[in-house]
Amino acid sequence: MRRYLSLYAACIRFSTLRALEFRLDFFFRVLMDTLWYAMHMAFFALLYRHTALLGGWDEAQVRIFAASLFVLDALHMTFFSNNLWWFPTFVNRGDLDYHLVRPVSSLFFLSVRDVAMNSALNLLMALGILAWAVAGSPQSFPAAQAAAYVLALALGAVLHYALMMLFLVPVFWLTGSSGLRDMYWVLDRFVGRPDGLWTGWVRRLLTTVLPLALVVSWPVRVLVEPEPWPWLLELAAATGGALLVLALAWRAGLRAYGSASS
């Protein structure tokens, strides 16, 4: 464990130095996410001019949902996005060989090697919006429930990573994965809507087979529902299951991988 923590700390140091070299990219990332935050909040505010509840939640609760979405998105962009973007290229070009010979888990290293420090300010902005949304809510949140919410946010971020990675792993057998990646980004829109909007087979699909509805909605339910623990346990089980499936798919993919020298 100490070796992995030291490796991750080195990745953060290297990524920070590299981010400081491209300050214009840093500026545009901040501007892009600021506009996205504003448009998203305006979208929900417009809806609440015509209804009192959305998916069973009032406006204050949906503000917390939107802020939680911003935090999860910033976590993904900071810690996972760049790595997942380059993974199919590494497989197709044979660059994966360099990572397979390292004395650490190849899945771990490929998932965390590049930390987008130029998105770190966006994470601070998202946390600020979350603090504003929670402070403006008429509900009171006990300390234990707030701590469970923080844990649930972390689980949601890992679940989101695992689900996206599962859509990319088929690159081991296919010539490319851009189609699957694009399909995931289409499905990912379900993450940005409260789960109460979905009913019937769509809800069953999004909470079991492809649990995208859990990524943001379940952490928010942990915070706003009177009984948070069933939601937290279900989210933990879904995250553990997704990671297990990913580990099995990764091993199968490595067995099918031909490497650059084949």
Image: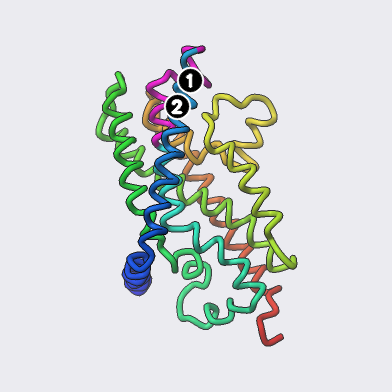
Q: How many residues crowd around disc 1 within 10 Å: few (fewer than 14), some, or many (20 or more)?
A: few
Asked whether 20 or 79 is in front, the reply is 20
Residue 18 vertical position relative to residue 223 in the rendered view, above or below: below
Q: Along the horizontal axis of the image, is 91 left or right of 52?
A: right
> In the image, what residue occupies the spot 63% across and 59% down?
168
Residue 250: in magenta span: no
Question: Cβ–Cβ below 8 Å for labels 2 and 1?
Answer: yes
- Compute the Cα span from label 2 to label 1: 6 Å
> Residue 198: x, y in percent?
61, 27
Which image quadrant for residue 130?
Answer: top left
Q: Is residue 169 left or right of residue 36?
A: right
In the shown orientation, is residue 234 left or right of residue 71? right
Q: Tell me the SS state at disc 1.
A: helix
> Looking at this view, is 112 or 199 the one in front?
112
Circle 2 crowding by C-alpha within 10 Å: few under 14, some 14–19, many from 20: few
Q: Nearer the viewer, residue 229 or 174?
A: 174
Q: Quadrant of the C terminus?
A: bottom right
What span is in magenta? 50-67
Q: Residue at x 57, y 62 (%)?
A: 247
Q: Residue at x 42, y 37 (%)?
A: 37
The amino acid type of the residue labelled 1 equals Leu
Q: Secondary structure at mark 2?
A: helix
Q: Which mark is residue 46?
A: 1
In magenta stretch: residue 57: yes
Residue receiving disc 2:
42
Mark carried by residue 111: none
With respect to residue 179, does 111 lie above or below?
below
In the rendered image, the residue lying farthest to the bottom is: 261
> Could you tell me residue 81's position as x and y percent?
50, 57
Q: Quadrant of the N terminus?
A: bottom left
